[in-house]
Image (cartoon, rainbow, N blue to C red):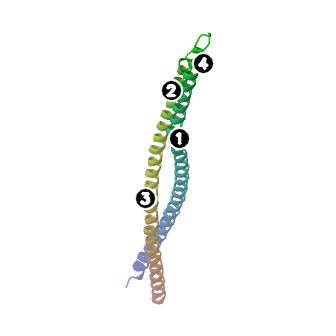
Amino acid sequence: MDYDYYYSNAQSRYYNACSEISSCQNRINDLKNQKQKKITQINELVYEIKNHEAAYDQMSLIVECDDSINAKILDISNKTSFAADNYISMVNSSTVTSKNLTDVYSDEMAQTKQTQENIFTSLNTKKTALSVEITDLKSQLRTAESDLEDIKNCIRSTESSLSDWQRNKSNAACDMEYYRSKMQEAI
């Protein structure tokens, strides 16, 4: 029986297994680095989502004040009209030239109302932009979490391959030892 052939075959399997073990270990290290980067990315996305949601909640509270501010501006306008009516009554009873307070303050009230509307329109636009950004961040988070699961699966698969190659290496080493001893017996 040609034990040299079987020994060479076992030795070839042994070195092939060593090469594959090294390759698997490198792959696992690379995947673990990818996993750590993905976890960091996920943590950053979670942090950004929380910040954006907090900003969105604050923006919502501010925008909800729009009705309250409108009511206060309307109240001021009504009180100005009431004061103007009283002022006209007082002026009509004297010889002083009358001025209509409603006319005097109407431009300022209109400008105040327009400024307030512009502010709340801008706030609503920014609130909508925040909502879109939160949706986008959540989508990125889902993608990153899916990628992380894929990486974990690759790690498990590569670890399984590593285990198989280690078993092959061990078997090849046993075969090499067996055929080496048989070659020595033949001498």
Mark 2 or mark 3: which comes first in sequence? 2
- Local packing at callout 3 (Cα closer than 10 Å; few below 14, some 14-19, many 20+) is few
Q: In terms of secondary structure, where does tag 3 sit?
A: helix
Tag 1 or tag 4, which sits nearer the N-term?
Answer: 1
Q: Residue at 41% of width from left, 82% of height from top?
A: 3
Q: Amino acid at mark 2?
A: Gln
Secondary structure of the residue carrying numbered label 2: helix
Front-most of residues 29 and 77: 77
Amino acid type of the residue that numbered disc 1 sits on in the rendered structure: Cys
What residue is disc 4 on?
90
- Residue name at image x 44 percent, y 47 percent: 136
Q: Considering only order in the chain, which callout, 4 or 3, is on the residue closer to the N terminus?
A: 4
- The reply to whether residue 169 is in sight is yes
> Residue 114's mark?
2
| Distance between mark 1 and mark 3 Cα atoms | 40 Å
Q: Considering only vertical position in the picture, is 31 above or below 99?
A: below
Amino acid, disc 4 = Met
Q: Does residue 11 appear in this view?
A: no
Q: Position of residue 168 (x, y in %)?
A: 44, 76
* Labels 2 and 1: the sequence-earlier one: 1
CA distance for labels 2 and 3: 48 Å
**Of labels 2 and 3, the one closer to you:** 2
Which residue corresponds to the image point at 54% horizontal and 35% vertical from the top-left? 72
Decide: marks 3, 4 in contact (CB < 8 A)? no
Instruction: Give the x, y percent position of residue 160.
Output: 44, 72
Q: What crowding class fits label 1: few (fewer than 14 Cα within 10 Å), some (14-19), or many (20 or more)? A: few
Q: Which mark is residue 146?
A: 3
